[in-house]
Structures are given as C-alpha cells and as structure tokens.
Amino acid sequence: MPTLLVHDAGPQTSVQDLGRRGSLRVGIPPSGPVDREAFVLANRLVGNADDAAGLEATLGGPRLEFADERWVAVTGAAMPVTLNGATMPRWAAFEVGAGDVLRLGPAASGVRAYIAVSGGLDTPPALGSRATYLRGQMGGWQGRALRKGDELSLGPKVGGAPAEVRGSLIPDYTREPMVRVVPGPQDDRFTKRGLATLFEAPYEMTTHSDRMGARLRGARIEHTRGHDIISDGVALGGIQVVGDGQPIVLLVDRQSTGGYTKIGTVCSFDIGRVGQVKPGQRLSFKRVTVGEAHELLRAYRRELDDAIAFPSP
Amino acid sequence: MGIYAEPRFLPCGDLALSVEFADEISHEANARTLALEYLIQQKALSGVTETVPTFRSLLVYYDPLVVGWDDLVASLRALCRQARPDVLPPARTVELPCCYGGELGFDLEAVAKQVGLPPAEVARLHASADYYVYFVGFTPGLPYMTGMPERLNIPRLVQPRVKTPPGSVSIGGVQCCIYSVESPGGFWVLGRTPIRLYDPSSPDPILLRAGDHVRFRMIDRAEYDSIAAAAVEGRYRPRIERP
C-alpha cells in the first residue's frame, strides 16, 4: 500500500482538507487549512481536486519518506524544501520516487506551509472530512498532530505535470498585510472612536495564537457598555474584543458560539494572510462594505483560477 | 428587552449573516430561531451552506457567488414571518443518568450549604426538573439549558476551575451545564453522567440537539460505573423519547 512515512513531524503538522461542513450547529468547527489559498494552490499544482487531503506544517516542517512515485508541491510559509538533501522549488510541482526523503526546514517568513501529494492522503474521514480538529481529537490521523513513525496511506495516483504558481501571485510574508474587514455584527457596541481605532494603527500578532484564534495586541478598542452579549454564533474571521480592548481574530478551529462583542469580521479571502503573520509581526485592517467584500471575493476567485502556469514541454 | 418587531440582519463578513430576533433569552425568541433554521432546511434555501442556532439568533453561512445579500435577506425575511414555534417537529426528551455527590459531584455539599438544603434534597430537586436545550455549542456537544429550579440559583464560582471533567453536571446562576469535553469553567459540579455528549470516534458524535428536553435520572456509583463501562464499548444507548 502506498504510504508516506513520517521520520520527523516538525513542531505541529496535521492532515487537513477543506474542512467539515454542517457541524458548527453542534459545536464542531470546520477545521481545514488556515491559509486556504495556499492549500488549494498546492493541490492544483499536483493535479488534485481542491479538497484532497494534504498536510499543514506550522513554523517548521516535517521530514517524510515516500514509498512510490508521486508529484509533490509545497506552498505557504517560506520553509526551505529539500529532497534527499537537494534544494527544491516552492510553489511548484516536482516528482519524487520511492525512498525519497522530503524535508521542510524552519519558516523564514510566514507561519504555515502546505504539502500536497498527488492522489492526496487517504486517512479515515470523520463527518465527511479528513481535516484534523486538534482540540476535539477528531479527523486527520487519529485526531492528532503527526508524530515520528506515523505511516499515512495515500490515495490512487492522479496524473501530474510540471506546474508553477505565477510569480506575481506568490505572497511576500515579510510584508505587513492589510486585511479587509466588514464591520459587525456588534459594531454598535463600540464608540465611534473605538471603531476608528481598529482601522487606524496596526496590531501585533502575539504568541498566544493558534488555529482557533489569532490574538493581537495594539491600541485599546473602546466599548460603549461592556463586552458581554447574549451568546451568538461566531463566523470565520470574527474579531472578538474582550474586556481588555484587544482583538482576537477567530479562525478555522474556533468555538461555534461566544458571549463577547464582535466589532467586525475579516473577509474570507484575507483569513489566510492573517494566518501567515508571525508573532511580533504586525497587520492592519481596512474597512469594506458587504457589497465591496463580495466584489473582492469574485476578483480573488478569478485570480486564483488563473494562478497556475503550465510551462510547455 | 424583548422580541423585535422586525428581525435584524447583521453582516458577519462576506460569507455569513446573523438573523437576530430579540435582545433577550426566552423560549419565544429561541423557538423562532429554531423554526427559521428548520424552514431553511425544509426549503433547502439556495446558497445557504450552514446554520448555527443560538439563544435568540441564527447565524447563516452562505455562498455569495450563489446568492447575494439582498436576495438572501428577502428570502429570510419571508421565512421569518412563518417561523413560529408550531412549525417545529415535536421535541425529543433525552434521559441522562447522573450520579450526584461524592467524588463525581464534588461541589454538592458546598451548594447544599449555600442554599440551606440537605445535599440529597439538592440532588432530588435538580433531578426532578425538565430542562430545555436552547442550543448546542461553544465546545462540541455542550448544551445551553434552561429549566433550573429557582431554589438552586446560586452565583458562579468566584475562582473558575482550570479543569472540569467531561460529563460534569453543574449549575451556576439560572443555568445548568453539562461539560462535553474537559475544560475550564465557573460552574458548581453536582454530579456526573456516564454518557458522552461528544464522542469523536462515533459516526454520530453529538448526543443533544437544540430544542431537546433533558431529564436526569439519579443513579448510584455502581450503576455509574457499569453504564460508563458499557458506554465506552458502545453498548449503552441513552433513553430518547420521540413523541
């Protein structure tokens, strides 16, 4: 049976696909890649469907051995990639053979890297998805991050071809990103000055950030009357502001509901960029309307569909 | 405080909106929320990808490339007019065995002292009530319930506990809570149910649903241990009444 053998798992590497849908109503988050764009591009590079299962590596990468010939692509955080010690390109598909060892080093910039293998990982699905929900010990490989010695099954091979992401579309994670935010659902629970504060000065990523939420630090955001609400649903990208006036951007492993005011919501197409900001690095917010966000989403999807170049042989 | 004359539609980014019926926690506001969710499911409303009911609002996830804001709000507004409690199917009643006091219900004595009743009477009172699940969430399978006997209303712990074991049946304020996973918390633990509210290895991992009624059945430690052992092997199914 074709497998992927884990020689070294890295700080936190987990199996992810595009996540489970329909389970938030019972408190189970979708999970899936924090940086959906980088994940999808890795799959497309190796000829997989967008929702094929791959790996998300955090801050540093794993060391993996292949048992048969596959196409592989690594996207996302700038982790140096080697195959049997030789440097390999990122954001591009390359072939590996039986016994080859792929290694990702520590991230020079960005936080999360994605590894796609043609055919995808074939771990047992839970509630229709192979995504790992780490806190809930669900999905992925035994509901947990990978460990040395794990052996993951691969799906049937799909045809691969040389392919690369167009240079202009490869993000520079050393730059401070500006992410788009739609105010609400509780923007009326903040003073005019509080709302303006969010969009003025940049916020710094703290180390208390994970797949559940990105905790930021910066200028204090002023409430009108306390930070408690009657608990309601928490959307992807919801910016929760608690008593200390500091924002938390809620991500793919978020709690389904919460009792804190949410000043705004980061747009889906900018969530991945939030997930690539290293602790100590900063990001800023830009205000958009729902209508503008939908236009931006359309443009973003078109860009994504045209992101990969197939060099002629 | 009260139910709004017209529901509010609040943007939650580019992929979701919240339909808010009230600024209060009430059966009426919750029933409208659950009824709207039910109608969306029944009509398979185009573009809606997922819904999350809470006390008094429904979070609706949608695909804006399938349905725009204006059309979605118009459809939801029409459904809201029909979203009355009587459209909902009859509720289930789930019976949860619970072992009160001792090492599993380590706060029972302290609660008894605070409310001025013998511990056995606190347990009896708690187990005699009919609880209603407003919604399930925050952590997987955790029910937000109402129905606590007024006599048991006590403030939450001053110093929240770092870890509370899953299955802990606990109270605080007007709420009764059952921890679904090990988590920190500010509730007083009266007992523990051997039933798992969240079982990640099961094909149907969540026991309780929004709109369910919950009743507790007092059991002793021996029965707790035998049900817990059977539950781990998947041999125990809690009693669920469907009218």
Image: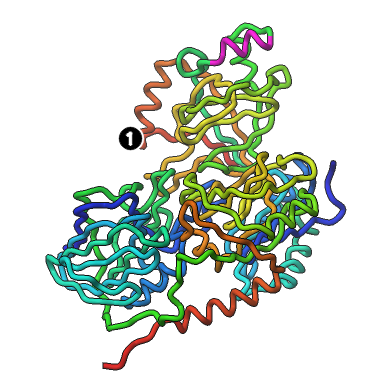
**For the view shown, which residue lies furthest in the bottom direction?**
A312
Most extreme residue toward the left, as rendered? A99
Q: Is residue A248 visible?
A: yes
Q: Residue A28, relative to residue B102: is it above or below?
A: below
- Left or right: where A146 falls relative to A35: left
Quarter where residue A15 is shown: bottom left
Magenta-drawn segment: B107-115
Q: Position of residue B157 (x, y in %)?
A: 61, 22
Does residue A21 appear to the left or right of A17 in the view shown?
A: right
Q: Is residue B111 found inside the magenta-colored segment of the image?
A: yes
**Residue A98, located in which quarter of the rendered image?**
bottom left
Q: Mark 1 points at which residue?
A: B233
Instruction: Name the residue nearer the viewer: A202 or B122.
Output: A202
Which residue lies at the image location 42% right of the left edge and 41% below the top edge?
A: B199
Name the residue: 53% across, 41% down. B139
- Residue B224, image x, y percentages: 42, 21
